[in-house]
Every structure is written in C-alpha cells, then in structure tokens.
Amino acid sequence: MRYISDEKELRKISIYTNIESVKKSLEQFFYKKETEEDSESERINVAIIDSSEPFSTKGTNNSEVIFDVTGGYPNTKQRVYKGVNKASLSKADLWLEIITSVFSVEISAEKLDLPGYLEELEKYQKMDIKKYVLTDEMIKDLEGYKELTKSKINHQRFIYAVINGYIVFPVKAKETIINGMEWKYGIKAFQKTCKYMFEKNDTVLGYVYEIKKEI
C-alpha cells in the first residue's frame, strides 16, 4: 500500500511507510492505493520506514529512495538514508517534513539544488535532525559575512532551509542564508521555497533543519 499525493503542491511523490505516526500525517494530503500504473504519473516513489519493525519488501524495493528512521536497513544499490537508532523514531515527522518539502512542486525562481542536496546527504551514513523556526535575527546574524575570515568547511552538518511560499521573501535574504552559513560557519546550506508546509495567513518566515552526521 502506498500513499499517493492528492495535493497540487505534492503531485510528484508517492510514499510507502510502516510508521503509524507518519501514516496519520499522510492522511491529510495523500490517499491510499495498492499499486500505481507507470503510465499514470511520473511520481518519485519514496519509503519512510522503521527498519526495527516488520515492513513490506515490495514497498521498499519499489522505492527509488529509502529513508530508514531507525537506521538498521542494509546498504543496497538504492539510495538509503538513515537515522541513528530506535530513539530516532520520535523524529519521524521531521523526516516526513523534509522529504515532502524537498520533492514538492517548485514555486520559486531560486530552485533547490537537488543534485547537490542529495550528494551532500550521501556523505552521511547516519544522521540526526533538529528543527528551528527561521527568524529575522538568524538572517541578520549572517549579514556582512564577507567582512569576516572565511571558515573551514564543517563536514559534520549542513542546513536545509524551507521558506514560506506565501510571503514575500527577498532574494538577497535567501542568498545571505546560503552564502553566509558557509562563509561564517563553514556549514553548507540549501533552501527550498514551498507552500505545502505553511498556511495562507502564516507569518513565519520558514524553518531551518540542521542535519548532523552521526557515527
């Protein structure tokens, strides 16, 4: 059973999961379907699983990308990204937010560097996720970054910023987030503008996800 997107911002994605909290979240914009004909769409098939619990091998084998929240899935030829351990299950919804926003419909001229994002993700065998609200203070902290000495690259973490697509967000501020994080802190950053994560009257600028490498 897969969850097929029924929301215009998420038409490109189909998800298999064995995690109950993720299933409940998916019921808002997705509908269940046993199989999907290839001719029906060009959706990206994704699996979000807890590998410590029973899961459908058909569901994972038919997925182009697998996100194993608890980190026990064996390495395969598929793209497999892993959480740390069973305790990571508490962050399953954060994984879902990242995945759906990454594959959501592009609505901005400044598009996500998806190849670069996936390349960065593949450097991490296991990873932890933290979420922060994006604030004006965060952006102001990065302004004037070129006046500072450029930092060495931090290979232990990177940033993924999701911008609220319902508000006017200056291109210069986006550039400040991407370039300032790498220059001032040595942390590579990616950004995606979407509406899926926000309400029409939402005034929050966006969210920042810190992806940290775990050994």
Image (spheres, rainbow, N blue to C red):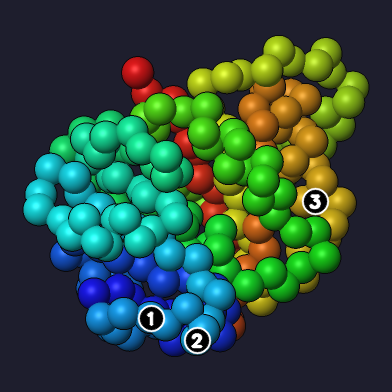
Gap between marks 1 and 2 measured at Cα: 7 Å
Q: Quadrant of residue 96?
A: bottom left
**Label 1 amino acid?**
Glu
Q: Which mark is residue 36?
A: 1
138 or 212: which is nearer to us? Answer: 212
79 or 172: which is nearer to us? Answer: 79
Q: Image quadrant for the C terminus?
A: top left
Q: Position of residue 150 (x, y in %)?
A: 80, 16
In this view of the protein, can residue 81 be seen by the observer? Answer: no
Q: Are marks 1 and 2 in contact (CB under 8 Å)?
A: yes
Which residue is painted at 79% across and 36% down in the image? 179
In this view of the protein, can residue 157 be seen by the observer? Answer: yes
Vertical placement of residue 62 versus 106, above or below? above
Q: Quadrant of residue 212?
A: top left
Q: Which mark is residue 40?
A: 2
Which residue is painted at 66% across and 58% down in the image? 192
**Is label 1 in a helix, a strand or a loop?**
loop
* Residue that mark 3 sits on: 173
